[in-house]
Each structure stands twice: as C-alpha cells, then as structure tokens.
Image (cartoon, grey):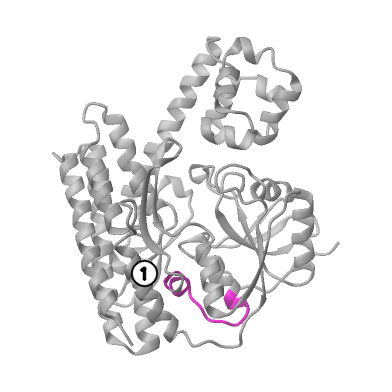
C-alpha cells in the first residue's frame, strides 16, 4: 500500500466543529471562514442545565449542541453532506479507508481522551471532538488535520479506532461525514441577516429558565447560593464555568469574540456599517465575560476580598449587556 | 479584546501548543491571534486536574491499604468517574461500586474483568495491579 495524501489547507481554528466545516467547505472552493460558519449556523447561545451532570458538574455551554453547526451550515448553503454511523468498528475503519481512496476528505467525530497527540492536561472523556482525515501512510497511520492544533498530526489506526468508537455520553458511534456535492458559488447576504435574527430571538431564551439570558441570570442566582462553608465545591464550580467558557476551544469569552468576528466579516461582505457597530458591541460584551472569568478565578485564589455576590453581580452585568445586544441585533435588517 | 491584550502566559496545560483566539486591531476589525495560554484559564484547568489527581492518590492509598480494589484507582487514574465508566463499560453504577470492594473484586472472573480492561485499554493483569511504590 502506498501513502494516500489528499490536498488540504490546514488552518488552525478556535473551535473544532466550525473549523472542520470551514476546512471541508474551503476544500470544495467555497470560501467560508470559521466565524462565518459559526454565525450562519446560529450557534451562539447560553445553556445551563443544573440537572445534567458531567463529571459531577452541571452542563454549561455557550453554543448549540454538537453537530448543529455542520448540519445547519450545509442545509443553508445547499451542500449535500453524507453522514454515516457504524455499529461495527472494523466496518467503520474500512469505510474511512474507502472514502480516502476515492479522494474525499473525511470529517470524523471522536473522543478527545484517546487521541494520543493531545497534551496530557487536556485529555478528558469528551466524545464530541471533530477532525478531518486527509490521508493514510503506508504504515497505516492516519494523517489528520485537527482544527485546534497549529500543525497537522499523525495518529495510529488503533488509537483512532478507539477514539471514534468510545462509548458514553454523546458517543460518536464512528460518525463520519463527507461532502458529496456543493454549489459553485453562494450569496451569503440573505443568510447573514436571517441567522442574526434567529440568534437574537434565541437569546431571550425559551420559556424554560435554562437558556439564553434567563439561563445566565439563573446561573448567577446559583452562584449566590453556593455554600460558603464548603469552599472547595464552590471553587470547583466556578473553575468549571471558566473552563467551559475559555478552555474548550471557544476563541475566548465563550464564543462571543468569534461571533463579533462574524459580524465584522459580515459587515465587510454586505457593506453595512450597522453590522460593524454590532460587532463592536459584541466585543465589549466579550470583554465583560472575560472579566467575569477573571473575578471567578480571583475568588478561587482568594487574592482579594471578593465575595460570591461580587462574582454573581459580574455575571448579571453580562446578562444585561446580552439583553442590550439582543435589541441591537433585532434591529438589523436589510 | 485588543490584539495587544491577547494573553501569552505560556500555560503548562498547553504543553507548548498554541491556541487561536479572535481579537481586534486598532481599527476595531477582527483577526485570529495565537495565544500561548491565559493564567486565569490555566488556573481553572489546574484546579480540575489537581482535584482528579487528589482523588487518584486517595484511591491508590485506599487500594494499598486493602480498603478498595485496584479498579477504583484505575478508574480515577484514567479520568473516568462512576457515571462515565458505567456508560462505557455497560455495568450499572451500583455494580461498579460493588466491584470497588476488594473482596468482591477478587472473586470476579477474568471475563467480567475483560469488560473493564477493554474500555480502559489495559490488560486484565494490569487491571489487578497497582503501581509499585517508588
């Protein structure tokens, strides 16, 4: 067997899913950047589900659930995406080889923990990581363009198999996706405005108190109620929020900066200065979130006489700014 | 966040890698900027990692003293928790809790242990062992 190496332009991204979408679309000649993919899929949101526990901590997310981004973008742009899941790992690996032999770039969902090229401290049992396979060496190692890394990486077949077929929450079941056909060119303008409108509507949340601005206020309330005697739990809880916001490939401030970048790019594409103003406002909102993260950690370090109330106040300030941003976004119309 | 404000704190958890962030230049337009880490973020990561390490160390101590089975140590050492191991191994949480008791663990058949070994990428022999005291 000889090496299969398909042409690919590796680009480092903040987030795995948007990065994969952007890489796959660009390989088909559609120039969609990472922030653009994020914006078009109306993925910006906030979720706090206290009853869903991950490693003993509640689920906190700053975007829509995995797979939403790739599905929404492809649907909007008229791109045909073939997704396959497998019950048999060997068949799943064979199908991957077949697609590579046909000359297709393949997107995969996999577990972070079993990918050997990840730094030790970043390996957790999280099953919804996305990457692109662009080839296979004669020795049987897969060539991978992992969007969160600076450079392309190599991964032995056994490890990739384990990562693809790890069980548990959000199990990938070997999920594999290939772009089958894509339009030659697309006009993004109408999609931009409709996505912004939808994102803004979602920000006020559904009727339930777990989503959007209501979710943020709900979380602030929870922070106020954290036990002051069991400080270890309170600290781990705050650290958990910060990790979800900054560590898990969000491009800073829980995707707020990425969204601002989308608005900035959109304003250039459409020549609409109002979009640029909205981008600036989102930047300020992002800075607010970063300050909240900083305060949370300062509380953990006990450097200053910060109380849980101060931390919660900062978070409520974020909620207030999100409300203002929502009003601005709703006014944007073409 | 301004481009010049992007933190470059050489986080230990990045292991020499860089991450892409989005930040604005002087005119307020966005650019991707790589960052070597942010102290605030790495502190939060370190807290979580330390917590897991503590649990692992505690389980190791207990296992050496014969108060729990090696399974409990391997579970934490490989960053599983009860819920996660239950979902991946197919055992119920109450079964895993039982298997963490040494007298029950010692009676388990190799076939049953193999089920753990498979999802943990260990051999049955490794699953029964504890790291030697160095």
Q: Quadrant of residue B3?
A: bottom left
Question: What percent of the width, then of the height, locates residue A103?
Answer: 75, 72
**Quarter of the C terminus of chain A within the rendering:** bottom left
Q: Residue at horizontal 86%, vertical 61%?
A: A1
Q: Quadrant of residue A189?
A: bottom left
Mark 1 neighbour class, 10 Å CA radius: few under 14, some 14 to 19, many 20 or more: many
Please tell me which residue lies in front, A122 or A105: A105
Q: Secondary structure at mark 1?
A: helix
Question: What percent of the width, then of the height, locates residue A208?
Answer: 33, 53
Q: Residue at horizontal 64%, vertical 33%?
A: B90
Q: Is residue A315 left or right of residue A207?
A: left
Vertical side of B52 occupied by A95: above or below = below
Q: Is residue A316 left or right of residue A192?
A: left
Residue carrying label 1? A199
The chief SS type of the magenta part is helix
Please tell me which residue lies in front, B66 or A58: A58
Q: Is residue A117 visible from the viewing direction of this image?
A: yes
Task: Judge whether residue A29 is colored magenta.
Answer: yes
């Amino acid at each position: 067997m000889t090496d299969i190496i398909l042409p690919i332009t590796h680009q480092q991204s903040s987030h795995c899913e948007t990065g994969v979408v952007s890489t796959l679309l660009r390989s088909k000649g559609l120039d969609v950047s990472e922030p653009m993919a994020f914006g078009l899929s109306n993925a910006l949101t906030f979720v706090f589900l206290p009853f869903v526990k991950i490693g003993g901590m509640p689920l906190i997310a700053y975007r829509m659930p995995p797979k939403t981004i790739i599905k929404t973008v492809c649907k909007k742009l008229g791109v045909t995406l073939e997704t396959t899941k497998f019950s048999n790992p060997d068949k799943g690996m064979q199908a991957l080889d077949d697609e590579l032999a046909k000359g297709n770039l393949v997107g995969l969902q996999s577990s972070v923990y079993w990918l050997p090229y990840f730094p030790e401290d970043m390996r957790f049992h999280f099953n919804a990581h996305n990457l692109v396979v662009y080839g296979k060496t004669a020795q049987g190692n897969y060539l991978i363009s992992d969007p969160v890394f600076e450079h392309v990486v190599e991964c032995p077949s056994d490890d990739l198999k384990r990562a693809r077929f790890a069980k548990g929450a959000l199990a990938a079941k070997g999920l594999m996706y290939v772009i089958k056909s894509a339009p030659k060119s697309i006009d993004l303008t109408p999609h931009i405005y409709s996505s912004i409108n939808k994102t803004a509507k979602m920000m006020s949340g559904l009727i339930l108190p777990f989503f959007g601005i209501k979710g943020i206020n709900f979380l602030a309330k929870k922070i106020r109620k954290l036990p002051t005697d069991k400080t270890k739990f309170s600290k781990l809880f705050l650290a958990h929020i910060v990790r979800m916001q900054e560590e898990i490939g969000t491009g800073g401030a829980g995707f707020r900066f990425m969204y601002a970048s989308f608005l900035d790019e959109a304003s250039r594409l459409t020549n609409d200065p109002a979009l640029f103003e909205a981008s600036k406002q989102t930047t300020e909102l992002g800075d607010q979130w970063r300050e909240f993260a900083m305060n949370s950690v300062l509380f953990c370090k006990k450097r200053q006489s910060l109380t849980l109330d101060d931390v919660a106040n900062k978070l409520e300030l974020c909620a207030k700014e999100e409300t203002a941003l929502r009003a601005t976004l709703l006014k944007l119309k073409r | 966040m301004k481009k010049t404000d992007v933190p470059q704190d050489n986080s230990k958890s990045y292991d020499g890698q860089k991450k892409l962030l989005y930040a604005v230049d002087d005119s307020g337009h966005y650019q991707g900027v790589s960052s070597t880490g942010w102290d605030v973020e790495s502190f939060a990561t370190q807290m979580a990692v330390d917590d897991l390490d503590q649990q692992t160390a505690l389980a190791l101590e207990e296992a050496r003293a014969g108060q729990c089975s090696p399974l409990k140590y391997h579970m934490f050492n490989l960053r599983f928790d009860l819920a996660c191991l239950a979902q991946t191994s197919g055992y119920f949480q109450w079964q895993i809790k039982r298997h963490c008791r040494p007298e029950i663990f010692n009676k388990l058949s190799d076939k049953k242990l193999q089920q753990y070994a498979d999802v943990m990428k260990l051999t049955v022999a490794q699953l029964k062992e504890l790291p030697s005291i160095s």
